[in-house]
């Protein structure tokens, strides 16, 4: 094993589905030792979500769970029981960071709120990830991922540059918002870890999903107080030249902002007469004339080419072109193969499945999957007996009582 | 004390993904010095990719202000060898360098990781680009809409059964957050071991990681997931519904029969809950278009915040689809000090969003507006690098400070 950026950092996770688990996956994949605490029986909600191999649901085969929980150990613990709470607190004494996603009132009921835990371990960082944060009139309001995306403005602004002012806003594909909240929380957590390592101080990090998502549209968010109006998703992009367009075998995206991009583009389409108009050398003018003068010609030109042709030829002409890649295209990308982006992960129940890998490449402390996602309660014995000193007979009793 | 106080960042970044990465470090307390010149002006000082707006002067861009809060600005022309020497002196007394030029460009300028390591052995350098600094497409260029396309996200985003859509600003800012996260991880490693390193971030890879389960579906089942609007795989109702007013919407998501019964009660239609088309999760999912119409016939008569209150009171997940005005009028955000104000020397008072992480012991704050172009030349060249006034004048005359 090579050295890791977060070697020696001890994390406890009591969170489920996407945001919290993704936050601690980011830490685990950089070498932090993460213990994931799940409810006995059902475990993490992501275990039910899938997709599953051959679409056959199985607690240990949900791709969402397998992806979000690499490099973690897993135990089961019923935090409603006194003994379960006691075990949790024993673990907390030897923990640097707790990642949790219970609503504030529920966390207090369970006794895992920051004020309670800091008395046990003043060094502790608690990162709380909830839909609306720890304080304020909406702090107990319920939100599923769809609601968070819309409360966080990301939904309202999607589709960006919509041509349909009468249609509803939508969520971006997949679970982008939840992942984004996990990343946001992980970033704040590392800032607190940096302080902890320097000063010995723990602290509470309050992450509101709504706010973490609004921050991703930080330009649009304060528009009303600054200008008295609110950007919509159907803004007419009069000043810029770019679009998503069909071609022979799919879609491409291009974005021509700078004049040298435009010049590259004119070369690319074979220097036609219409493109020689000097007015097009002005960025704002080009943008204004895009929809009426330029767009129809680009559509006509693009329809005879494949997406691969347009992408590589466009880029060779120094013009920002991209393919709207399907998942299949991404998995089979030669570029990503050369960079080793996808990795094979072997799981004891689910088998070997290819997964997306490192979000970035660190030269001295490489990202790696060294351990697949845990099966439910896989490390109960290791953690409870080896670390906390319970006997194997204790484990039998705890299991019978439904505590683990 | 903010977490990164005492950390100095030389910021070669521009546009959104790069600028916001270092802006996050500035919000965390680092001293971030943006290196810019007339020869190579940050395009967010010139135009806005989200709104299509063009700015007549580099100090009048509100977008630039939002992307570069709390930074300092120093003018150095990096195409001049004296400029390169000058910036290396700054690197020597800094901890982190961040850049997002096309891979190879910094090396060509004599400012690659190896060059910087010579003057500062434990420097942490992050390079952010469209495709990363290795691989056959390493020199390809892009903006957020292109990252959303190449990463796979555009393909799975859009209305059900219709064409894919681009995503934009949020993709840049997610990439920026990944960059800040990576730099923090490297700072923690340096804190423990004294060792710096190079970080290669591809904005498209940093986006693809957010759809891990979608790629696995293809790898396991050969399935290309496509577009499904606001729909969920299990939950129904699960959509946004038009409310009273212009372009006002409420998002409602229902997971259980109990939640659905409560929704029917509040809407004044308890009969929906016993209608066999909607009786359980499975039938609701298959008849969701019909159900959506019924729900919208109710929501259309109410303001979106009222629908939220009515439904949340009985434990149903409902939030407006918020625009800027909704956010500004939201008492919850107000109470949480979500907004901050900065006094910009040219733009005047500007409302911005405060750092969104509430850290109990080392609270964050917006330390100031974005810098004017070259605003901190005296501080950087005089106070930090110790050049006297006549030397600074000479560099200005020679166009090195430019």
Image (cartoon, coloured by chain):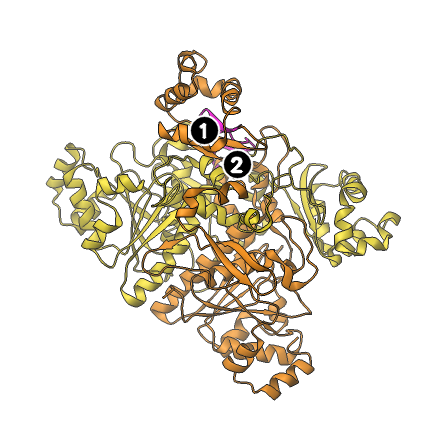
Q: Which mark is residue B379?
A: none
Taking depth in this image into account, of B340 and B116 the one nearest to the observer is: B340
Magenta span: B219-243
Q: Position of residue A101 (x, y in %)?
A: 33, 43
- Whether residue A105 is visible: yes
The chain whose colour is orange is: B
Q: CA distance from mark 2 to mark 1?
A: 20 Å
Q: Position of residue B43 (x, y in %)?
A: 65, 59
Label 1: few (<14), some or many (≥20) within 10 Å?
many
Asked if residue A201 lies left or right of residue B88, the reply is: left
Q: Which residue is mark 2?
A: A171
Q: Is residue A94 above or below residue B299?
A: below
Taking depth in this image into account, of B331 and A135 the one nearest to the observer is: B331
Q: Secondary structure at mark 2?
A: loop
Asked if residue A59 lies left or right of residue A387, the reply is: right
Q: Position of residue A70 (x, y in %)?
A: 37, 46
Q: Residue at x 60, y 74 (%)?
A: B110
């Amino acid at each position: 094993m090579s050295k890791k950026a977060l070697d020696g950092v001890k994390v406890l996770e009591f969170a489920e589905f996407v945001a919290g688990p993704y936050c601690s996956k980011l830490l685990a994949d950089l070498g932090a030792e993460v213990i994931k605490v799940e409810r006995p029986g059902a475990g993490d909600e992501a275990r039910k979500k899938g997709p599953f191999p051959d679409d056959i649901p199985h607690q240990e085969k949900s791709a969402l769970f397998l992806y979000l929980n690499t490099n973690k150990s897993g135990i089961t613990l019923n935090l409603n029981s006194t003994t379960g709470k006691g075990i949790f607190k024993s673990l907390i004494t030897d923990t640097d960071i707790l990642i949790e996603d219970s609503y504030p009132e529920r966390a207090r009921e369970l006794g895992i709120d920051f004020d309670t835990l800091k008395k046990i371990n003043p060094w502790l960082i608690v990162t709380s990830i909830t839909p609306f944060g720890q304080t304020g009139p909406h702090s107990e309001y319920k939100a599923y991922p769809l609601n968070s995306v819309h409360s966080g403005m990301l939904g309202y602004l999607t589709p960006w540059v919509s041509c349909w002012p009468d249609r509803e806003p939508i969520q971006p594909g997949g679970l982008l918002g939840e992942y984004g909240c996990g990343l946001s929380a992980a970033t704040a957590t590392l800032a607190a870890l940096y302080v902890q390592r320097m000063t010995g101080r723990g602290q509470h990090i309050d992450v509101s999903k709504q706010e973490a998502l609004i921050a991703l549209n930080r330009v649009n968010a304060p528009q009303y107080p600054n200008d008295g109006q609110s950007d919509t998703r159907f803004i007419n992009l009069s000043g810029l030249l770019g679009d998503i367009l069909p071609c022979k075998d799919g879609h491409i995206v291009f974005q021509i902002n700078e004049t040298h991009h435009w010049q590259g583009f004119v070369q690319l389409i074979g220097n036609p007469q219409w493109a020689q108009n000097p007015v097009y050398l002005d960025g704002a003018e080009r943008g204004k004339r895009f929809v009426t003068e330029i767009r129809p010609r680009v559509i006509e030109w693009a329809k005879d080419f494949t997406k691969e042709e347009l992408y590589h030829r466009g880029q060779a002409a120094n013009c920002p072109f991209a393919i709207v890649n399907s998942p299949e295209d991404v998995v089979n990308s030669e570029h990503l193969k050369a960079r080793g982006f996808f990795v094979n992960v072997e799981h004891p129940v689910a088998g070997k499945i290819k997964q997306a890998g490192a979000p970035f490449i660190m030269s001295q402390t490489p990202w790696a999957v060294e351990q697949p996602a845990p099966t439910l309660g896989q490390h109960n014995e290791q953690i409870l007996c080896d670390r906390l000193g319970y006997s194997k007979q204790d484990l039998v009793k705890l299991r019978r009582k439904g505590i683990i | 004390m903010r977490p990164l106080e005492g950390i100095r960042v030389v910021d070669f970044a521009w546009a959104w993904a790069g600028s916001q990465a270092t802006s996050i470090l500035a919000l965390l307390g680092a001293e971030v010095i943006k290196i810019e010149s007339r020869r190579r002006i940050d395009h967010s000082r010139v135009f806005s990719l989200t709104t299509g707006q063009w700015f007549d002067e580099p100090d009048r861009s509100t977008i630039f202000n939002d992307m570069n809060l709390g930074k300092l600005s120093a003018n150095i022309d990096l195409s001049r060898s004296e400029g390169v020497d000058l910036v290396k002196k700054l690197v020597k007394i800094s901890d982190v360098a961040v850049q997002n030029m096309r891979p190879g460009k910094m090396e060509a300028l004599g400012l690659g990781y190896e060059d910087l390591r010579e003057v500062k052995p434990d420097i942490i350098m992050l390079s952010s680009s469209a495709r990363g600094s290795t691989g056959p497409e390493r020199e390809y260029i892009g903006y957020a809409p292109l990252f959303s396309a190449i990463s796979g996200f555009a393909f799975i985003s859009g209305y059900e059964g219709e064409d894919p859509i681009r995503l934009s600003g949020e993709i840049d800012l997610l990439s920026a957050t990944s960059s800040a996260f990576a730099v923090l991880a490297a700072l923690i490693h340096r804190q423990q071991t004294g060792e710096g390193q190079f970080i290669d971030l591809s904005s498209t890879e940093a986006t693809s990681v957010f759809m891990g389960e979608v790629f696995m579906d293809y790898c396991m089942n050969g399935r290309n997931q496509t577009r499904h609007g606001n729909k969920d795989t299990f939950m129904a109702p699960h959509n946004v519904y038009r409310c009273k007013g212009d372009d006002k919407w409420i998002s409602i998501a229902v997971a259980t029969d109990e939640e659905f019964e409560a929704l029917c009660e509040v809407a004044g239609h308890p009969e929906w809950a016993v209608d066999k088309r909607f009786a359980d999760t499975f039938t609701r999912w298959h008849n969701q278009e019909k159900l959506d119409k019924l729900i919208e016939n109710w929501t259309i008569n109410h303001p979106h915040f009222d629908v939220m209150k009515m439904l949340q009171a009985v434990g149903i997940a409902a939030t407006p689809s918020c625009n800027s005005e909704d956010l500004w009028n939201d008492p919850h955000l107000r109470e949480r000090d979500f907004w901050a104000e900065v006094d910009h020397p040219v733009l005047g008072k500007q409302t911005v969003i405060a750092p969104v992480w509430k850290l109990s012991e080392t609270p964050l704050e917006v330390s100031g507006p974005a810098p004017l172009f070259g605003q901190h030349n005296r501080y950087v060249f005089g106070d930090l690098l110790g050049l006297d006034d006549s030397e600074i004048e000479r560099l200005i005359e020679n166009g090195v400070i430019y």
